[in-house]
Amino acid sequence: MADRLVFLGTGTGVPDGHRLPSALLLEVDRRAWLVDLGPGVLRAAVRHLGLTGLRRILLTHFHLDHTADLATLFFALKNTRRRPRHLEIYGPPGLGRFLETLLHPWNLPLEIPGMTLTLHEVPPGTVLETGLLRITVFATLHTEESQGYRFQHPTFSLAYTGDTGYDPSLAVALEGVDLLVTEVSYLRPVRGHLSPLEAALLARAAGARHLAVVHRYPDQPESALRAQMEAWIPKTLRVWFPKDGEVWPLRRLRESGV
Ligand SMILES: [Zn+2]
Ligand SMILES: [Zn+2]
């Protein structure tokens, strides 16, 4: 199977009937990485991987629209034998405590017979090496714990910020990336989130080749978002507004189109 990126969700915690909360699925060298797990995302992920294929989850931060389906997942794992043998969850420091608190009201166990669970609390600066893929964790400007992930592979590079406000130092972590997936929540600047203009400036400062905008709240039309960015987009940068379910081949990111 060719390496690919699936936009499982491109929205937020406010349902609009079209978008799930923002979440990515990366399939690289026959390994799948799910990034964020807001409400509804588990079902979309299972459509691609089955429950048994869900083995590696990365979390950007603990807000509901990025984590709530962890509870759904542990309910499912408890109630089926069709589960992965090993599950690894990576997230900010505090991940273990967060997960125990989340599962407590439903009395859902972290320990599932026949499955090993490893929780990796990975602060910014952590580098994970797995085969040819190197994943670097970087801090973002959203919550105390929020962080993004950069995926570096010989054939592509991709970074996902999760939720973030504008911070010029982010461009260092994102430098030269083929694809920047970042958020634009609203047309107007809001603390802890990016406006369209700020997303364009960030992609430009990083020298990214492609910018994919996710985490759009309802009633933020593409035309209005794009109009605010237009004057700030260099010729070397292509801007995309993916829909839920879009699948992109990762090896084409170095070419001009997707
Ligand atoms: Zn958030
Ligand atoms: Zn969010």
Image (spheres, grey):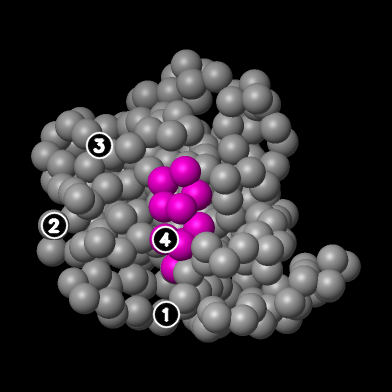
Query: Could you tell me which residue is drawn at 58 percent across and 75 percent down?
Result: 92
In the figure, 5 relative to 217: above or below? below
Q: CA distance from mark 1 to mark 3?
A: 27 Å
Name the amino acid type tagged 4: Gly
Q: CA distance from mark 2 to mark 3?
A: 19 Å
> Which x, y percent locates residue 229?
42, 28
- Asked if disc 2 and disc 3 are in contact, CB closer than 8 Å, the reply is no
Residue receiving disc 3? 237
Q: CA distance from mark 4 to mark 1?
A: 28 Å
> Which x, y percent locates residue 234?
25, 34
N-term mark: 4 or 1? 4
Q: Nearer the viewer, residue 154 or 207?
A: 154
Q: Nearer the viewer, residue 125 or 76?
A: 76
* Quadrant housing residue 56: bottom left
- Tell me the SS state at disc 3: loop
N-term mark: 1 or 2? 1
- Asked if disc 3 and disc 4 are in contact, CB closer than 8 Å, the reply is no
Residue receiving disc 4? 53
Name the amino acid type tagged 2: Thr
Residue receiving disc 1? 125
Find the magenta span and give its range.
46-55
